[in-house]
Image (cartoon, rainbow, N blue to C red):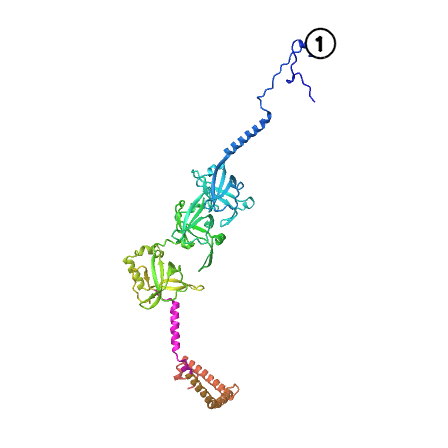
């Protein structure tokens, strides 16, 4: 079906001009009269269609987003770890104080396959973290001496923690830590270095105490290059770091310090934490004032216990060897050398030697003595070591009986120690003061002397002829039995007769001495007469004393 064409349709042929129009009009089918001829103009082709506007707008938005993304994106850094446990590309976040500052992009292996390389895209605001001293570590659930950490990652997953550096040097490659650092860059305080003989029960995170208050922790340790000790780094937080002076003393506060003295048992420990995890304590000596505040990374000596830390400096040691002719069972390296209750040194070695001259064994014990432990006054009076005066003084003390002796320090454990004391009856000994080490004379301990005396008594008892004594004693017993038989047969009958006669005599004497017996009555009357006679004599004596003339003239009133 063909649609009707309008008068302005360009496909319609133009009507004839001139006389043709009049003929058509006369036929009754042409255009109206006086109508202008239409002007046909073609449609403009230079304006685009509205369909192309949408892609252009989308492209413009995409460019804007790309520019915004590129402008807001920070640097890309690479962190190497031993393991990529818990890390996932595109999911694991990098956080600083629980704020996201980046995301893990890719995880690859290093060329030698010893570590993993983690590429991290930081945000624009985290550009300052890409500096030289920034530290990274993976935050996971951990149980350490300082406590339990990272429990939040059980639900959210592991993430990379950051400790912001303060350097101005940019860096894009980092070596990640295997655990969180003990001290972060925003913590205030001082780090100190301690040198000790052993690590004991200490670990990273072990507490540091000052007067039983926790003021810091152990942040690192390492074995000395020569293998003779350990070096520890401890961090004391502010404001407690002001109590660390140049004269502060440090010691192991691990475990329990149990002592028995004249006042009874004494239990000393810093806290229950140190009993399980160990710890370190420091303090200024009681007889000293706090020195100037110690600077960062100051080095201190780490003592084994508080008493060792508070002891005055030992000074130069004197190396001494003591030869004992007895068993050294119970004596160990480190045993104290005691002089009347004052520890002057410790045992450093125990050995055995064969003496070719005497063809016997001797037990040498090497000892380090510290004369400065005798006190400040003794230090001022004692001559310098190695001089002739010091040798003369030592010989004088030995002549007075100064000797070394092994003694039992604990009856339960039978542990021995070396005691220095004076034994006036000890034999004279010549000491070589120039020898190194110095050979010091010894005496046996009282227990050994007692054993020798008991052995001597046993030898003497063994010489007693017990068999001969037994034979003689048996003969003596036989003779005694014979004597007892003779006494029973011969002497006993006579003794019975004698006792019977004595009994009769005692009976007669008793009857005689009874109160109603004639003898008793006669004696009673005689005593009465004697009493009256004595009374008369008394009266006469009194009269003569009053009238002595009556001896010549007679009694007055008497007739001549």
| Residue 540 point in image, percent of width and height | 43, 82
Image quadrant for the C terminus? bottom left
Identity of the residue drawn at 39% across and 74% down? 457
248 or 120: nearer the viewer: 120
Task: Determine which quarter of the picture holds residue 347.
Answer: bottom left
Residue projecting furthest to the left: 388
Position of 7 relative to 520 (above/below) = above
Q: Main secondary structure of the magenta part?
A: helix
Position of 161 relative to 489 (above/below) = above
522 or 559: nearer the viewer: 522
Residue on which disc 1 sits: 26
Image quadrant for the N terminus? top right
Q: Does the magenta-highlighted stretch encompass residue 461?
A: yes
| Residue 410 point in image, percent of width and height | 43, 63
Q: In the picture provided, is 273 more to the left or to the right than 196?
A: right
560 or 63: nearer the viewer: 63
Is any atom of residue 95 visible in this view? no
Q: Does the magenta-highlighted stretch encompass residue 149?
A: no
Is any atom of residue 534 visible in this view? yes
For label 1, the SS is helix
| Residue 525 point in image, percent of width and height | 49, 86
Residue projecting furthest to the right: 28
Magenta span: 442-470
| Residue 321 point in image, percent of width and height | 34, 61
Position of 297 relative to 453 (above/below) = above
What is the number of callouts on the image? 1
Neighbours of disc 1 within 10 Å: few (<14), some (14-19), many (20+):
few
């Amino acid at each position: 079906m063909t649609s009707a064409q309008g008068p302005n349709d360009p496909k319609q042929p133009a009507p004839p001009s001139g006389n043709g129009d009049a003929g058509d009009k006369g036929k009754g089918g042409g255009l109206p009269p006086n109508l202008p001829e239409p002007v046909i103009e073609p449609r403009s082709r230079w304006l685009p269609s509205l369909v192309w506007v949408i892609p252009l707008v989308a492209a413009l938005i995409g460019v804007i987003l790309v520019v915004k993304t590129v402008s807001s994106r920070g640097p890309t850094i690479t962190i190497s770890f031993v393991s990529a446990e818990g890390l996932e590309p595109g999911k694991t976040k990098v956080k600083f104080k629980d704020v996201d500052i980046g995301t893990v992009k890719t995880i690859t292996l290093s060329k030698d396959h010893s570590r993993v390389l983690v590429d991290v895209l930081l945000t624009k605001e985290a550009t300052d973290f890409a500096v030289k001293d920034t530290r990274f570590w993976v935050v996971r659930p951990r149980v350490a001496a300082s406590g339990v950490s990272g429990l939040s990652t059980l639900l959210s997953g592991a993430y990379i923690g950051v400790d912001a550096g303060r350097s101005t040097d940019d860096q894009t490659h980092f070596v990640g830590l295997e655990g969180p650092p003990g001290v972060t860059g925003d913590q205030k305080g001082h780090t100190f270095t301690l040198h000790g003989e052993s690590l004991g029960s200490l670990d990273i995170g072990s507490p540091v105490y000052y007067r039983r208050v926790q003021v810091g922790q152990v942040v690192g340790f390492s074995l000395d290059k020569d293998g003779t000790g350990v070096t520890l780094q401890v961090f004391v937080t502010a404001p407690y770091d002001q109590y660390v002076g140049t004269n502060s003393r440090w010691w192991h506060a691990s475990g329990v310090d149990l002592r028995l003295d004249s006042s009874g048992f004494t239990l000393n420990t810093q806290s229950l934490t140190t009993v399980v995890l160990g710890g370190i304590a420091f303090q200024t000596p009681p007889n000293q004032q706090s020195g100037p505040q110690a600077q960062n990374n100051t080095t201190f000596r780490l003592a084994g216990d508080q008493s060792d830390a508070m002891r005055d400096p030992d000074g130069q040691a004197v190396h001494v060897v003591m030869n004992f002719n007895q068993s050294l069972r119970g004596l160990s390296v480190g045993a104290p050398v005691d002089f009347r209750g004052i520890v002057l040194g410790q045992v450093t070695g125990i050995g055995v030697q064969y003496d070719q001259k005497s063809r016997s064994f001797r037990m040498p014990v090497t000892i380090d003595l510290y004369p400065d432990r005798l006190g400040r006054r003794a230090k001022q009076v004692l001559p310098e070591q190695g001089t002739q005066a010091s040798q003369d003084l030592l010989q004088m003390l030995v002549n007075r009986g100064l000797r070394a002796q092994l003694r039992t320090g604990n009856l339960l454990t039978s542990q021995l120690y070396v005691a220095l004391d004076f034994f006036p009856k000890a034999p004279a000994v010549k000491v070589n003061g120039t020898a190194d080490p110095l050979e010091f004379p010894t005496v046996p301990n009282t227990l050994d002397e007692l054993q020798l005396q008991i052995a001597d008594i046993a030898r003497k008892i063994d010489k007693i002829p017990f068999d001969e004594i037994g034979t003689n004693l048996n003969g003596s017993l036989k003779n005694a039995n014979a004597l007892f038989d003779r006494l029973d047969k011969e002497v006993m009958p006579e003794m019975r007769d004698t006792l019977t006669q004595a009994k009769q005599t005692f009976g007669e004497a008793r009857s005689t001495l009874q109160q109603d017996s004639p003898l008793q009555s006669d004696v009673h009357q005689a005593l009465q007469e004697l009493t009256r006679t004595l009374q008369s004599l008394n009266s006469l004596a009194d009269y003569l004393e009053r009238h002595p003339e009556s001896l010549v003239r007679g009694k007055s009133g008497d007739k001549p």
